[in-house]
Image (cartoon, rainbow, N blue to C red):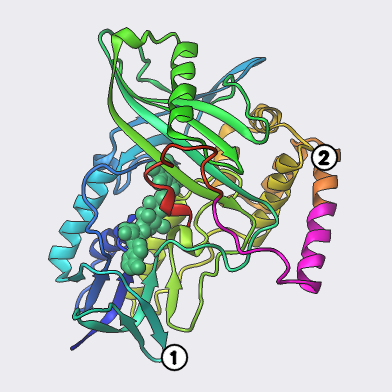
Amino acid sequence: MTVDVDVALVGGGGAASLVLAALLRHGVRDLRIAVVDPVHRRGQDRTWAFWDQPGNELDDLLSASWSQVEVITPDAYRSLDLAPLRYAMLRSGPVYERAAEAERRLGVTRIVAPAEGLDDDGERVLVRTGGDRPALRAGWVLDSRPRPPGRPGRTNWLQHFRGWWLATDRPFFDPQRAVLMDFRTPQPARGVSFGYVLPVDSRYALVEYTEFSPRLLTGAAYDAALAGYQALLGLDPARCTVREVENGVIPMTDGPFVARPSPRVVRLGTAGGATRPSTGFTFSAMRRQADQIARALAAGQPPVPAPAYPARHRWMDAVALRALDRDLVGGREFFGRLFDRNPASRVLRFLDGATTVAEDLAVMRSTRLLPMVTASVGDAAGRLHDRLAPDRRPPWSPPPPVVGDEPPADAGVAR
Ligand SMILES: Cc1cc2nc3c(=O)[nH]c(=O)nc-3n(C[C@H](O)[C@H](O)[C@H](O)COP(=O)(O)OP(=O)(O)OC[C@H]3O[C@@H](n4cnc5c(N)ncnc54)[C@H](O)[C@@H]3O)c2cc1C
């Protein structure tokens, strides 16, 4: 049996949930939609932090938001006023619920099975689901299944982290401020680490330890790093309870994610290049693209969003990643200077891919010149080498954990 639809969402995670909610919001009618995913996502499996202007469709879903954030290095403490932006925390549960509500109201067909292949003949796409489940024939496929970049990057790092939802027995956190990046954590031999604190109220916060580096840690090593960060914050473990644990791995690579693999297939989310290589932030680009897709479909147009980031930002990220990876610049210094020499709102809009060329130049001027020139030259040589010998590098896959122990539960995201 084959089910005919206008749009099939293959992968029903973050990117697809935002698309479903946007379709309902933009009043899309009479569109036959299907979602294919072996897992029907519900509940809290991740927490999104991002910045935006208050007063929009996500306001009533947020767990918390802050107009002030802190960026801390061993030598400086920065309290940044984000106005007119805010830094916001959105847990996955409300996002999946809103998507489920949209599914009901839009009459979406859900197929709880993995998609095994897509055959695009230029007019329609056959989505093969395997076994005795119905195949789908779709006018367009929005594909967010996790996948590696089209070719291995010249720099292949990971953002990997573990967070504890900590409840304290007395007021400890300042709910008016979030800690965006705290670089006082011990730094890994290769890469950069930082902690952060996202308080929901004075007794409850998400406290995370994050690394930007080529290798995952063991579970025990994340716990040790988090315990160390907890101590650094002055939190007494005897007065805290870990209510939930959150793990994640996000690719940070200059390998290109192919956004349009065939005429009627559009890749979304991390698989479509929505992850910013220099930071791992993904949410804002997914949200922007979801909105563009819904507007297009509401207007009877093809659901093809603009690229997640301008090409010049992808180049700047490739250079920055290279400079960090080749130890031309230290991570603490790099991010410290970025926030010291630019208004916070410019840095945040830059990281969202929303700055003008003039603002990009100002951001570039805030980094140290020599390492960046060296990294730019290396990047240009790498590009030339790729053109002349494209297939020499081994296929990219995340490296295994250092020793023993299980990798973080969500390691599959980066596969
Ligand atoms: C724990 C965590 C925290 C994060 N926090 C932030 C943050 O604070 N800010 C930010 O900007 N970004 C963050 N990210 C990065 C990014 O926003 C998320 O990974 C986001 O969920 C990516 O959305 P996605 O749709 O690309 O992937 P996912 O949400 O992972 O969805 C992919 C879907 O594809 C499905 N799938 C897999 N195989 C198949 C198949 N064969 N057929 C059909 N479906 C399949 C999966 O079941 C899954 O539901 C975080 C990531 C993680 C893991």
Q: Secondary structure at mark 2?
A: helix
Q: Nearer the viewer, residue 168 or 358?
A: 168
Residue 362 covered by magenta stretch = no
Q: Position of residue 324 (x, y in %)?
A: 71, 40
Q: Residue at x 82, y 40 (%)?
A: 371
Q: Which residue is mark 1?
A: 122
Q: Nearer the viewer, residue 79 or 375?
A: 375
Q: In this orientation, does residue 283 appear? A: no
Q: In this orientation, does residue 265 appear? A: yes
Amino acid at dot 1: Gly
Categorize mark 2 by other alpha carbons within 10 Å: few (<14), some (14-19), many (20+).
some
Amino acid at dot 2: Pro
Q: Position of residue 311 (x, y in %)?
A: 65, 61
Indicate which disc, 2 or 1, sits on the residue closer to the N terminus: 1
Q: Which residue is mark 2?
A: 371
Magenta segment boundaries in residue numbering: 377-398
For residue 148, above or below residue 71: below
Looking at the figure, which quarter contains the N terminus? bottom left
